Amino acid sequence: MFNINFNYVIQIILPVYLRLEKQIAWLKVITFYLRKIYEEFVVFRTLKLYNINFTGQVMYLEKKLQDTFNCPLLSISDGVVVLPFYLFNKSERKLPVYFYNKSENKPPIYLFNESEYSHQSDFIVNIPIACYNLLTTDEINKLHSIVRYYLTFGKKYKIKTF
């Protein structure tokens, strides 16, 4: 459907008595810009067909990033999620929380601010330091834009070098 041979179309559409060299050459000149637009369309279509083969799934996103930045060691891993610690009222009937002295050798309990929990990431894009150092600012922005394009709503990510 998208394979058009303009030279063939020109010759088929012209009546036999108008198929002269000058007439065909003139029609080729007239259709020059149409051919150029068609070639750009074919390139755009090929690129879009390539892009729709990828999703936000880890294996597809890894493949897309590896292909784009030519870095086969680039990988995606799960982010570390720290669950917030809550203190409850007695009326809420939750399990009691006990604080211990240092001498009792119990694991420490840490209390964090809400802002410290909001900066957690759901996954980490791991990129080798050698590949990351070769990237320009525009390519780093492209890396972020690719990840954001395929990112599921509400997910957060970090880019780490190793």
Image (cartoon, rainbow, N blue to C red):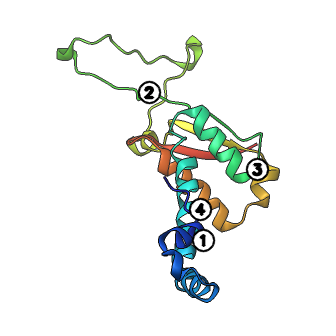
Instruction: Verify CB contact (< 8 Å) between mark 4 and mark 2.
Output: no
Relative placement, left or right, of 153 versus 44 is: left
Q: Earlier in the sequence, mark 3 or mark 2?
A: 3
Disc 3 residue type (three-letter): Asn
Task: Identify the residue under disc 3.
Answer: 70
Give above or below for 68 relative to 79.
below
- Give the image location of residue 55, x and y in percent: 51, 39
Disc 1 residue type (three-letter): Asn
Q: Residue furthest right?
A: 130
Per the image, label 2 sits on a secondary structure element best described as: loop
Rendered residue at 57%/19% (across/down): 102
Task: Identify the residue under disc 1.
Answer: 7
Per the image, label 4 sits on a secondary structure element best described as: helix
Disc 2 residue type (three-letter): Leu
Task: Identify the residue under disc 4.
Answer: 43
Q: Nearer the viewer, mark 4 or mark 2?
A: 4
Q: Which mark is residue 83?
A: 2
Relative placement, left or right, of 100 versus 140 is: left
